[in-house]
Image (spheres, rainbow, N blue to C red):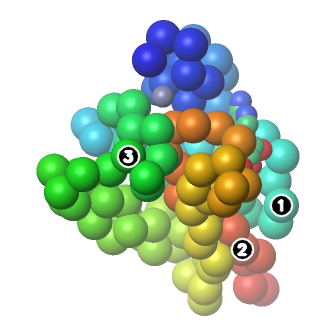
Amino acid sequence: MSDCLFCKIVRGEIPAKIVYQDDDVLAFNDIRPAAPVHFLLIPKRHIESLLTTTEQDQALLGKMLALAPSIAREQGLGEGFKTAINTGLAGGQEVFHLHLHVLGTPQG
Ligand code: AMP
Ligand code: ZN
């Protein structure tokens, strides 16, 4: 998707503070953090939202959830964090490239 904001971040056309990436996924800090640590974990491949995922995306979705705690730990959230996926206009989604919000406060 050429005009998708998060695809542009994947392609390096828009800067972002990247905290993790591999062949399948990218994690970067949210530009308007709602907590001291707030990053978004996205598939590199354009998927609009959870509403458009199929059975073929099961492994990717599982990978995203499984990766969240290890990236969160690296960001100081080893004691815990919140996750959210806003889905569809009615679900408050603003950027239509699937993303998992991970938010929290490092515990001193
Ligand atoms: P959602 O409402 O779940 O679609 O959340 C979209 C999120 O993307 C919001 O928390 C925004 O602050 C965040 N966001 C929008 N533009 C950027 C950007 N260029 N870099 C990082 N995060 C962004
Ligand atoms: Zn996209």
Q: Is residue 38 left or right of residue 5?
A: right
**How much space separates mark 2 and mark 3, taking CA atoms?**
28 Å
Which circle, 2 or 3, is nearer the viewer? 3
Q: In the rendered structure, find residue 52 and report the number of the disc placed on it.
A: 3
- Picture quarter with the N terminus: top left
Residue position for label 2: 104
In this rendering, is residue 105 above or below 62? below
Q: Residue at x 43, y 52 (%)?
A: 51
SS at mark 1 in the image: loop
Q: In the rendered structure, find residue 108 and report the number of the disc placed on it.
A: none
Question: Is the residue marked by circle 2 packed among few (<14), some (14-19), or many (20+) residues within 10 Å?
Answer: many
Of residues 75 and 68, the one drawn nearer to the viewer in this rendering: 68
Residue position for label 1: 34
**How much space separates mark 3 and mark 1, taking CA atoms?**
26 Å
SS at mark 3 in the image: helix
- Which residue is farthest front? 90
Q: Earlier in the sequence, mark 2 or mark 3?
A: 3
Which circle, 3 or 1, is nearer the viewer? 3
Query: Splitting the image into 4 quarters, where does residue 79 fall?
Result: bottom right
Mark 2 beta carbon near ligand 1 (under 8 Å): no
